[in-house]
Image (spheres, rainbow, N blue to C red):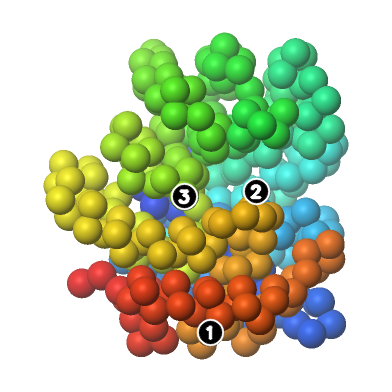
Amino acid sequence: MEVNAGTFEPRGVIPACLMPFDADLNVDEMAWEAHLADIASVDGISGITVNGHAAEVHALTSAEQKRAVLKACEVLGPRGVPVIVGIYGESSREAGRMATHAQNEGAEGLLVFPPAFMASGGHMRPEMIVEHLRHISDNSDLPIIVFQFPLVSGLSYPLSTLVELCEKFPTIRAIKDQVGDGNQHERQIRELHALDSPVNILTTHSAWLLGSLVLGCDGLLSGAGSVIADLQVALFQAVQAGDLETAKAINDRIYPTVRAFYDEPLLDMHNRMKEALVLLGRMPEANVRPPLMKLTAAEIEKIGRMMAAAGITAETVYRNVA
């Protein structure tokens, strides 16, 4: 399947991949390619995101991010799996260059993070994120997914700003919503769906995924898909079919993974996913770059118990749903 620039529609289940490192904390490309192939083998996914939070993008150099795009397109292109590239950084000019690079390498969508410095009041200066997105859209016509951060982060956009962005930049085709507030979440779903050119909502409320999806989300974009993409696909399909009983049963299977990945402190969530894949024989090592640190033996043991409670084993991972 070949998808031309601008034709990818961000909806459905889009896992965000992890980034394996070796003992010297260099990118382990062989392990990473195998990880991408594992996720891509799950029937029903709509694409895979690289250079996101799950890949520890905060700790990747610009060169490593560019290399990740190239390798992901090489691995996933022949499989017909669209590559969505995280655009993460403080400089709007560099964001524009990264968007150009992603499109030139064959990516089919962009996930745009807010610059972290905007936590100090950026919501009061919406013209800043408008300018940031202008640099990206001027340098690429790929579909954009805007990352809506949690309210508590200081980096979320007021609903009026989201609407303005969607109306000003027609290449915005979805919001990755992590706003963290059910009331705001539902308003965003309803009001962005009601635009003249409706914008999709991809939830990343992975700790309350069923509740989020039934509000009307068009899909999900989540780092937990690096481990449970098959369960996410099954849950999304059940919700779309209006089969709440099946959805609740699948959610019961997902719940132990929520406790494994998303208990406090939340910043260790992708660290925990790596440990889960090591326990499941799908990743050689669970190394993370500082300031992230290796988990304790007790927490790794908990992750193992939660995987067992979810029915996820070395034999069933990525194949847990018939």
Label 3 and label 1: CA atoms lie apart by: 21 Å
Image quadrant where residue 321 sits: bottom left
Decide: few, some or many residues near mark 2? Use Cα within 10 Å; few <14, some 14-19, many ≥20: many
Q: Is residue 229 above or below residue 309?
A: above
Say which residue appears at 62% left-offset and 55% top-offset. 264
Say which residue appears at 83% left-offset and 38% top-offset. 90
Q: Is residue 67 above or below residue 31?
A: above
Say which residue appears at 70% left-offset and 34% top-offset. 153
The percent coordinates of residue 101 (x first, y second) are 72, 50
Would residue 206 appear left or right of 244 to someone viewing this image?
Answer: right
Residue under label 3, please give it: 206
Image quadrant where residue 214 sits: top left
Image quarter in which the C terminus is found: bottom left
Label 2 and label 3: CA atoms lie apart by: 19 Å
Decide: few, some or many residues near mark 1? Use Cα within 10 Å; few <14, some 14-19, many ≥20: many
Q: Secondary structure at mark 1?
A: helix
Using the image, tell me which numbered label, if any, was put on residue 279: 1
Label 1 and label 2: CA atoms lie apart by: 28 Å
The percent coordinates of residue 53 (x first, y second) are 65, 53
Would residue 213 appear left or right of 123 to someone viewing this image?
Answer: left
Say which residue appears at 72% left-offset and 18% top-offset. 123
Identify which amino acid the numbered label 3 is placed on. Answer: Ser
Q: Are marks 3 and 1 in contact (CB under 8 Å)?
A: no
Nearest the camera: 167 or 163? 163
Nearest the camera: 270 or 51? 270
Nearest the camera: 3 or 121? 121
The percent coordinates of residue 121 (x first, y second) are 79, 20
